[in-house]
Amino acid sequence: MSESDKPKSVAQLLSHQAHSSLSPDELLRFVKERLREAGDLPNATVEAQILLAEELAEFSLGRFLLENRGLNAYWTHQLVTWDSNPEKLRRLGKLERLIFARLPAVLATRERFGIFRQQLQALLRPGIMMASVPCGLMGDLLLLDYSRQPNVWLFGVDLDMQALAGALELAKDRGIADRISLSYENAWSIASLPKVDVITSNGLNVYEPNDDRVVELYTSFHNHLLPGGVLITSFMTPPPILSEKSAWVEAEIDQSLLPLQHLLFSRIIDAKWTCFRTHEQTRAQLEKAGFTGIGFINDRARMFPTVIAHKPL
């Protein structure tokens, strides 16, 4: 990437704010003022909400969420690749431990990441070309086993320069930096990506409220797949409180944590990832973009399903 190709701004990022001019103390004061203006909730007074905000501000992930209202490539990678062991748990505070190890939404996206890797590993063959859009740290592809797969080519596309830098470092750590090509581009208008056999995409649609824009995103993926190519993507299903068509399997979800999860994400963090869709909506959007042979692989809670869609031959 030449200097002229490098972005002057990352304000277009959907997933998280590029930066904040507020100091940590100023940010916390801003959040507290917002919570006071919003008032009490049936299950949480303003004072209780403020205590949670103060607890979030005590650890790195919490501070990032308060400032950015979303996850960047680094923190997404940390959450989906995190594995619990006693030593790790001891180093975490109570709320941080709960987020990493027990929160239903985090468990669902971690399971979703595992499903992605299983499906992608099964598709590997010599000479295959695979792309991750947006790639983040590109763990979905870079953590696969390529020991028996020569001449594989991997492509990463993202609008976050820090994500691209992180993906390159992970590729170096994995010993496959010579197999990847990274580009700073918008997922809706990719110019440099050749037609590939597989595209993997997670997370972008949960930040995009416009259904037509999501169809345009899927159409962009369709256009960059070879005939017979495969798209592996995902979506967030609506919780029962928001939709009678919710697919959630309540028996697989720790119900005691749902009020806290809602309080953290919806009120305190004011998260940007709030674009839920049903299986039926997602199927219709993919079909409108030209995909066929659409199938779903659900996580246990059916909160963050994986979708496998095919471009016709």
Image (cartoon, rainbow, N blue to C red):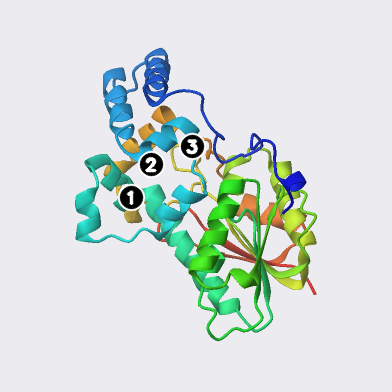
> For the point 65% across and 46% down, which residue is it?
159
Residue furthest to the front: 3
The picture places residue 31, in percent across and down from the top left corner, at 40, 22
Q: Quadrant of residue 39?
A: top left
- The image's mark for residue 61 is 2
Residue furthest to the top: 37
The residue carrying mark 3 is 242
Is residue 25 depicted above or below 110 in this figure?
Answer: above
Say which of 253 and 110 sits in front: 110
The picture places residue 119, in percent across and down from the top left corner, at 54, 72
Is residue 68 depicted above or below 155 in this figure?
Answer: above
> For the point 76% across and 61% down, which residue is it?
193
The residue type indicated by label 2 comes to Leu
- Sequence-wise, the earlier of marks 3 and 1 is 1
Quarter placement of the N terminus: bottom right
The residue type indicated by label 3 comes to Leu
